[in-house]
Amino acid sequence: ILIGCATPQVSLPVGVASIMYANARADYAMARVYIGMACAAGKWDKEACEAAKKIDIRAKVYRDAIEKALMNPEQPVDWAQVLKFSEEVTGLILKLGLMP
């Protein structure tokens, strides 16, 4: 508990959180389309497609929690979830070769 109290906390306005999340969500939607096409065309092996499905399941959990917090100003935004969602989106985009 003492360690938790001593850790730095970051807070941003909900508008900033919304913009960050919207950008990550748009990137993720694009990545999902490319992944679906790559898997359907056989350009990705079965393991990579299964890994992408697992990431998609985790991303949905993050999306649900983040969107609930953004819609309810009394509920704090879990920045760890926003960052984790963004990290997974970036990982997918890198894997697709859409970002150097």
Image: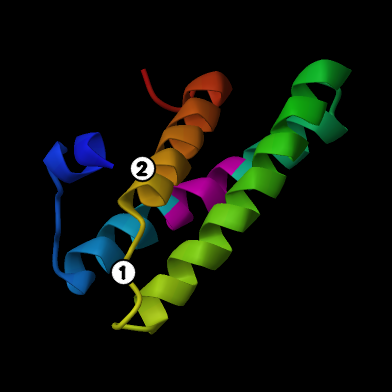
Q: Quadrant of residue 51?
A: top right
32 relative to 97, above or below:
below
Label of residue 76 in the image: 1
Three-letter code, disc 1: Pro
Q: Position of residue 55 (x, y in %)?
A: 66, 37
Q: Quadrant of residue 17?
A: bottom left
77 relative to 73, above or below:
above
Label of residue 4 in the image: none
Per the picture, the main secondary structure of the magenta-coloured stretch is helix
Residue depth check, mark 1 versus mark 2: number of the one nearer the observer: 1
Q: The residue tagged with tag 1: helix, strand or loop?
A: loop
Is residue 44 something that shows in the picture? Answer: no
Three-letter code, disc 2: Leu
64 relative to 9 in the view: left or right? right
57 relative to 62 in the view: left or right? right
As for residue 53 lying within the magenta part, the answer is: no
Is residue 15 something that shows in the picture? Answer: yes
Which callout, 1 or 2, points at the residue further toward the start of the chain? 1
Quadrant where the image shows the C terminus: top left
Q: Residues within 10 Å of mark 2 (few under 14, many from 20)?
A: some
Q: Position of residue 74 (x, y in %)?
A: 30, 83
Q: How many angstroms separate mark 1 from mark 2 (CA)? A: 15 Å
Q: Could you tell me which residue is drawn at 36 percent across and 74 percent down?
A: 70
Residue indicated by mark 2: 83
Q: Could you tell me which residue is drawn at 86 percent across and 34 percent down?
A: 40
> From which residue to which does the magenta span run?
25-31
Q: Residues within 10 Å of mark 1 (few under 14, many from 20)?
A: few
87 relative to 76 in the view: left or right? right
Residue closest to the eye, 20 or 72: 72
Q: Position of residue 76 (x, y in %)?
A: 31, 69
